[in-house]
Image (cartoon, helix red, strand yellow):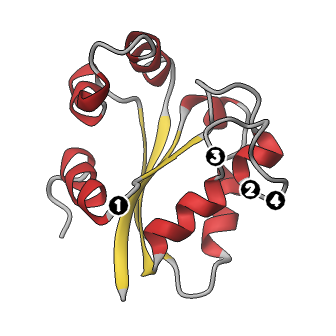
Amino acid sequence: MSQRTLVLFKPDAVRRGLIGELLGRIESKAGWKVAALELRTLEKETLEQHYAEHVGKPFYEPLVEFMQSGPSVVLVVEGERVIEGVRALAGPTDPIAAAPGSIRGDFGTIVRENLIHASDSEESAERELKIFFPDFS
């Protein structure tokens, strides 16, 4: 079953020059395609919507601040089991726990600046895609 997911290459990935490497890992997966891609500095309002479930948690404010610290690459990726697949490709949030071969396992340094975001379910993907690409169909 083909799906769509939101993927963000976070400001640390952009700053470190990893856009091509991360994009290549997604594009090399058979059957996956990038349907939309933009480099943009994310606005506070967008991030507040995106991270709404984390309001009040100790990491919320630093996370929003970090995500505004520079441009991110915002993508729509389509393909078979792409939601589950991109999550596996990204690896666990903690780069020390992430396996070699995963994005965070190979390039991650700290938990908060963890290079990539990928929707964690079909419901999240649908909600997040509307936030970042409201006119995409």
Distance of label 2 from label 3 (alpha carbons): 9 Å
User: Upstream in the sequence, badge 2 or badge 3?
Assistant: 3
Q: Label 1 amino acid? A: Ser
Pick the residue in front: 21 or 81.
81
**4 vs 1, front mark:** 1
Residue 68 vertical position relative to residue 1 in the rendered view, above or below: above
Instruction: Give SS at disc 3.
Output: loop
Residue ID for mark 2: 102
Residue ID for mark 1: 121
Say whether marks 2 and 4 touch (CB < 8 Å).
yes
Quick one: label 1, few (<14), some, or many (20+) residues within 10 Å? few
Residue 116 vertical position relative to residue 80 in the rendered view, above or below: above
Q: Label 3 amino acid? A: Pro
Say whether marks 2 and 3 touch (CB < 8 Å).
yes
Distance of label 2 from label 1 (alpha carbons): 19 Å
Distance of label 4 from label 3 (alpha carbons): 12 Å
Distance of label 2 from label 4 (alpha carbons): 4 Å
**2 vs 3, front mark:** 3
User: Upstream in the sequence, badge 1 or badge 3?
Assistant: 3
Residue 36: % across, % down: 38, 63
Question: Which residue is found at the position 35% from the left and 29% from the top?
Answer: 42
User: Upstream in the sequence, badge 2 or badge 1?
Assistant: 2
**4 vs 3, front mark:** 3
Tell me if 30 is positioned left or right of 2 in this view.
right
Residue ID for mark 3: 92
